[in-house]
Amino acid sequence: MTEFRPTGFQILPTIIKNLLIINGLVFLAQNTIGHSASFNMDDLFALHTWQSPLFKPWQFITHLFMHANLGHIFSNMFALWMFGSILENLWGPKRFLIFYISCGLGAALCHMIVLFVENQDLIHAYNSINHLSENYVQQLAVFINKYAPGNPISQDTADEIARTIINEPTLGASGAVFGCLAAFGYLFPNTKIYLYFFLPIKAKWFVLLYAGFELTMAIANSAGDNVAHFAHLGGAVVGFILVYYWNKTNRRNFY
């Protein structure tokens, strides 16, 4: 299938419509009651590394419906509607919902593994080294330089920033959305996507270029970059594997 030619197309199918509503309501809650003195939605529902005392199992799902700001939710929901509505029309609501949640879980798992590896040395330094020693502060400084680049770091500051790193929340539907993008690129490789609404590029090249950009940014791990690039890649990989398997078995319905 090289070009998408819809038949019986719904511009706002059931699952997409409900995902847009739920994400919108959660975003509204985040910006009204989500950061009160007695209740913090990020602490409870955003995804935290296994090493954090704030981690809860349900965060694997709930973080998919939370977003950091208006630009974040708009870009994710626009891409979800743009690519996800086509997939839901093609597969039906049950199959698309399973696909969407699977991509989100795969993205979260990939991100959690990366965080676990990245934080191991930090936790070792925090737990095993005498906090009163200069060596402790110097070792922590290696891992927190992106928070206080080039500045002298006291013990109290090192402790505070170490806790900030371990408890940093991850939120957003980007991993699941990247799965939708990967599936669209696989199923409709020659369909044109218009970047910024006027620059045409085939879906297969768009997906490959975007994946390459995410991989480059993930490896670079630049200071101040708080985007979960490996989560995006994880969602895309899960999405590709699922759509490849489903397409290979040539099943139109999934129950």
Image (cartoon, rainbow, N blue to C red):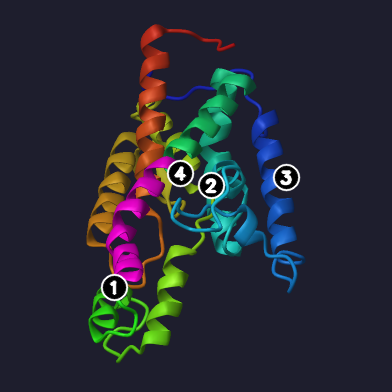
Nearer the observer, disc 2 or disc 4? 4
Circle nearer the N terminus (3, 2): 3
Residue under numbered circle 2: 173
**Residue 121 in magenta stretch:** yes
Question: Could you tell me if the residues under marks 4 and 3 are in contact, i.e. CB atoms within 8 Å?
Answer: no
Nearer the observer, disc 2 or disc 1? 1
Q: Is residue 26 left or right of residue 142?
A: right
Q: Is residue 158 left or right of residue 100?
A: left
Q: Is residue 4 left or right of residue 254?
A: left
Residue under numbered circle 4: 108
Question: What is the C-alpha distance between the residues marked 1 and 3?
Answer: 48 Å
| Residue at left offset 30%, top offset 53% | 117
Circle nearer the N terminus (4, 3): 3
Image coordinates of residue 163 in percent, x first then y, are 45, 71
Front-most of residues 236 and 13 = 236
Give the class, few, some or many, for how many residues have Cα within 10 Å of label 1's Cα (few <14, many ≥20). Answer: some
> Image quadrant for the N terminus?
top left
State the extent of the magenta-drawn residues as a range.
Answer: 108-128
Question: What is the C-alpha distance between the residues marked 3 and 2?
Answer: 13 Å
Residue 200 can be seen in this image: no
Q: Is residue 131 left or right of residue 87?
A: left
Callout 1 amino acid: Ile
Question: What is the C-alpha distance between the residues marked 4 and 3?
Answer: 22 Å
Circle nearer the N terminus (1, 3): 3
| Residue at left offset 49%, top offset 41% | 177
Nearer the observer, disc 1 or disc 3? 1
| Residue at left offset 41%, top offset 60% | 227
Give the class, few, some or many, for how many residues have Cα within 10 Å of label 3's Cα (few <14, many ≥20). Answer: few
Helix, strand or loop: magenta stretch: helix
Label 2: state its secondary structure.
loop
Label 1: state its secondary structure.
loop
Callout 4 amino acid: Ala
